[in-house]
Image (cartoon, rainbow, N blue to C red):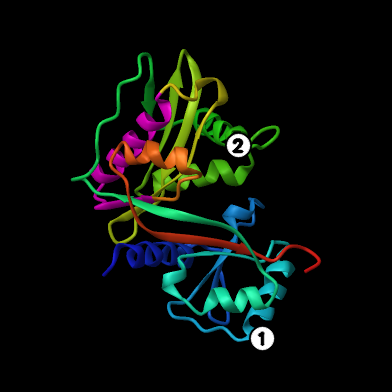
Amino acid sequence: MPVDTDVQNYVRTLTLRSPDHYRVGPFTVRHNPGWALKFANYAIPDQDAAPTSRDVEDLVTSMRAHDRLPRLEFLPAWAPAVEPALLAAGFTVENRAPVLACTPGTLLAPKPVDGLRIAEPATDAEFTTAAAVQHTGFGGQGGPEDGEIAWLRAATDGGGASALAVLDGQPAGSGCCSSPAGGISELTGLAVAGPFRRRGAGAALSAWLTRAAFDRGCHTVWLEPGDPGVERIYAGIGYRRVGEKLDISLEPGS
């Protein structure tokens, strides 16, 4: 089975495991009641789905009833007929991003960073600190939401890994490899605090998390890089392109 199909199967499996997911026609919706962030709430089509206009209308109605933006994240090759149906209904493409994957045989060691310490959070305070780094790193204001803290805990408790990096005695970065399914995990939520960027902390943290996932039985770790510059960092530790992911949504009033 192609790696991109494995990745989409993985995402759909985790969505079906989430306690608050629901089905609408040929779509499965990942709903996070404790975290309104749009990236934590989205729908995934069934493989080779061919939704009707009524299917799309029902999805929009349902997600809005749950006070969430009608939004999907999926690999277009998984269900080629879905994107045209969404565009015809007024959806707008937010982003197209490469999907990268790494295996134990391709993982490379990054350059060491003097004074950098990386460890898995264990206490409530450590999980809160790690979530706070993510929250501000992705543009959030104030402290982290409960859903952000729970997300990191779920990664660790579910057989994945989470990490907090400390540099110069200060929280410098955090991220996680989410709970595995079928030997696959996603490296996600990786954030480096502003003062510590461009010092190698991101590459070191990514490699640490990837290795932790492999040590816990995964054979593939995948991710979606934020931009070409970030993609180059991941390429430097052994990640390679395996497909493309689409983020698409219907803005309020549409």
In this rendering, position of residue 214 left or right of residue 158:
left
The Cα atoms of the two marked residues, 2 and 1, are separated by: 37 Å
Task: Report the magenta stretch's main SS.
Answer: helix
Left or right side of 187 for 210: left
Of the 4 image quadrants, the one containing the N terminus is: bottom left
Q: Quadrant of residue 215?
A: top left
Magenta stretch, residue numbers: 200-222
Eyeballing the image, is 66 above or below 152?
Answer: below
Quick one: label 1, few (<14), some, or many (20+) residues within 10 Å?
few
Residue 237 image offset from top left, x and y in percent: 30, 37
Q: Quadrant of residue 83?
A: bottom right
Lower sequence index among marks 2 and 1? 1
Does residue 220 sit above or below 167 in this rendering?
below
Q: Which residue is drawn at 22% across and 44% down?
A: 106
Residue 149, quarter of picture: top right
- The residue to which callout 2 is attached is 135
| Quadrant in which the C terminus is drawn | bottom right
Camera-side residue of 223 and 208: 223
Q: Between 227 and 113, which is closer to the camera in this rendering?
A: 227
Give me the residue at 44% from left, 67% from top. 12
Residue 54 is marked as 1
Judging from the image, what secondary structure is the residue with disc 1 in?
Answer: helix
